[in-house]
Image (tube, rainbow, N blue to C red):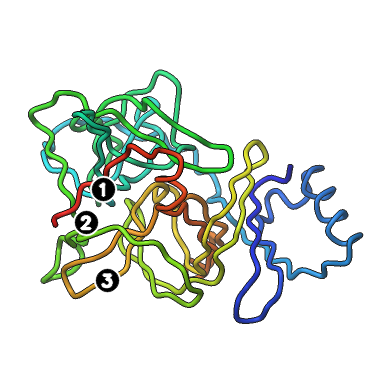
Amino acid sequence: MPKECTGYINSKTNNIIIASCNESRNEPNNIAFINVINDRMYYPIFIYKNCHEPSDNVTPSLNSRQVVTRILAGDGIIFGNAADKCSVGFWARIPPNENFIATAGHCYEHGSFYFLFPWNSTHYVPHVLIGEMQYYLEELIDFGLISIYNNKDLQPVPSIRNTDSEQYKELFIDDVILVSSNGAHLCFSGLESHVGCGYVAALNGFNTDGDYFTENLFIIELASRFGDSGGPVFSYKNLSHVSLNGIVSSCVDDFYDKSTGILGITTISSILNELEDLEIFTVS
């Protein structure tokens, strides 16, 4: 299957969009995929982005000073010898009392411990321990659950981080709703991008990374950055309360143009269909 590729039907133009990265466009599987698409005369619009930051061979330093006890959706997670990072999606449980932090399944790494990593951190520092990823999926649906260890220093809350706002630094999750229409206005919160908003371009997208295929994504034409994966996607009810709609799964964006991107979202309905016993914490 092709690598770093997202596809969907744009509701505004009624065209098939295939978004991918310049760095992988000459991969054999990508070339074969494009040839098949062209042979079948689907006539899609191909979009290519410069997805990867040039390597500067800088090794992150480790320094443990800051203590963080509250964990909100949108906060960062580090794992894999403090070299990898994702974002918190939401706080959930499986009855009677198994508590989890939800994130993207592709953030799984065998044997890794997951630590809270606050916004604007300047060092790759293991802060408060969350736990290990107990459950994950990368095929068809991109979703994972990190088991919360019995850590008295860690308190998850049903809110989304919005610290850049002067007045509404936390957005309270009132409920969980399904997105059912193109053009809906949605936002996400993530470790690197913080909060960004855009409009739903499609409800039927897919993504492949060369190893796994995910489907039933809804697509937002919005940029994100490495480390935002797993962050919550939400819609505003008022200035301080929101509805949870999904989590960030994938993005095809341009390293040289931070304003554009194709964001793939794992829907709440896909998650709850897969894990029927999962309960998502809200403030109501």
Given residues 47 and 56, the one toward you in this image is 47
**Labelled pair 2, 1 in contact (Cβ < 8 Å):** yes
Q: Nearer the viewer, mark 1 or mark 3?
A: 3
Q: CA distance from mark 1 to mark 3?
A: 19 Å
Residue furthest top in the image: 111
Given residues 95 and 122, the one toward you in this image is 95
Q: CA distance from mark 2 to mark 3?
A: 13 Å
Above-or-below relation of 172 to 134: below
The spot of residue 96 in percent (x, y) is: 20, 29
In this picture, residue 73 sits left or right of residue 4: left
Q: In the rendered structure, which amino acid carries the disc numbered 3?
A: Tyr
Mark 3 Cα shell of 10 Å, populated few (<14), some (14-19), many (≥20): some
Q: Residue at x 45, y 40 (%)?
A: 274
Mark 1 Cα shell of 10 Å, populated few (<14), some (14-19), many (≥20): many
State the residue position of label 2. Answer: 161
Q: Residue at x 44, y 59 (%)?
A: 224
Q: CA distance from mark 2 to mark 1?
A: 7 Å
Above-or-below relation of 280 to 180: above
Q: In the rendered structure, which amino acid carries the disc numbered 2?
A: Arg
The spot of residue 115 in percent (x, y) is: 26, 32
In this picture, residue 116 sits left or right of residue 136: left
Q: Which mark is residue 75?
A: 1
Can you say which quadrant of the picture contains the C terminus?
A: bottom left
- The first of marks 2 and 1 along the sequence is 1
Which SS class for mark 2?
strand
State the residue position of label 3. Answer: 236
Can you say which quadrant of the picture contains the N terminus?
A: top right
Q: In the rendered structure, which amino acid carries the disc numbered 1?
A: Asp
- The first of marks 2 and 3 along the sequence is 2
Residue furthest bottom in the image: 12
Which SS class for mark 3?
strand
